[in-house]
Amino acid sequence: MPASNEPIEEAESQAEAPVAEQAPKPKKLTFTAEQQIRIETLLKAASKEARAEAARLRLEIEAAKKPVEADTNLLVRLAQVESERDSLKAAKQEAAVRETLQSAAGDIFLDSGLAVRLMKDSIRVSADGVLTVVDESGAPRLNNAFENMSVQELAAELASQKPFLAGAAHLAA
């Protein structure tokens, strides 16, 4: 077996030899005093330019970040304004519903506020602000003429179903 390893070792040593010859060590350069001064001047100028470029790029990055922060603040403010608008819209709609129910309750009930609270669960408001009288399942209620029941008809029905809430003027009629 030792004889078979010898050719392999020789081949490896021959493969390494050309690699060592291809990479000669670089010669050490020597510069005159004038050349040394010129090289240092060039290096200082290049260094100064690189620092200036880095500072300019830092400023550009900072300037680019500011609009993003402003846009974020704008988006937050926009969300707040939209939320306020929706709240005001809902409050306005609620006031309109209450006013309509109060008007329908009129002089029929002893306590119109209580009647409004009782009728409120039977009212739905559409996207365009139209009031619809609905049953427990949310389906529109119909009157005797098979038309959508009005709020005034709902108030009259409540007064007839719960006469203890109705005033004397309604009972006499």
Image: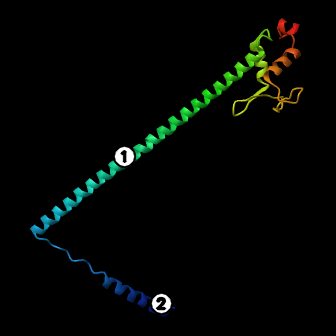
Give coordinates of residue 62: x percent, y percent.
Answer: 36, 46
Of discs 2 and 1, which sits in the foreground?
Answer: 1
Q: How is the image coloured?
A: rainbow
Q: Amino acid at mark 2?
A: Asn
The one of 44 and 56 positioned closer to us in this rendering: 56
Which residue: 87% across, 11% down? Answer: 163
Give coordinates of residue 22: x percent, y percent.
Answer: 31, 84
The one of 14 and 125 positioned closer to us in this rendering: 125
Give coordinates of residue 164: x percent, y percent.
Answer: 86, 10
Q: Secondary structure at mark 2?
A: helix
Q: Which residue is mark 2?
A: 5
Which residue: 72% across, 32% down? Answer: 126
Give coordinates of residue 155: x percent, y percent.
Answer: 81, 18
Compared to residue 90, the image places residue 5 above or below, namely below
User: From the viewer's perspective, is 75 left or right of 155?
Assistant: left
Q: Which residue is mark 1?
A: 63
Which residue: 47% across, 90% down? Answer: 5
Residue 92 is labelled as: none
Q: Secondary structure at mark 1?
A: helix
2 or 1: tag closer to the N-terminus = 2
User: From the viewer's perspective, is 43 left or right of 93?
Assistant: left
Q: Amino acid at mark 1?
A: Ala
The one of 132 and 86 positioned closer to us in this rendering: 132
User: From the viewer's perspective, is 6 left or right of 110?
Assistant: left
Which residue: 49% across, 92% down? Answer: 4
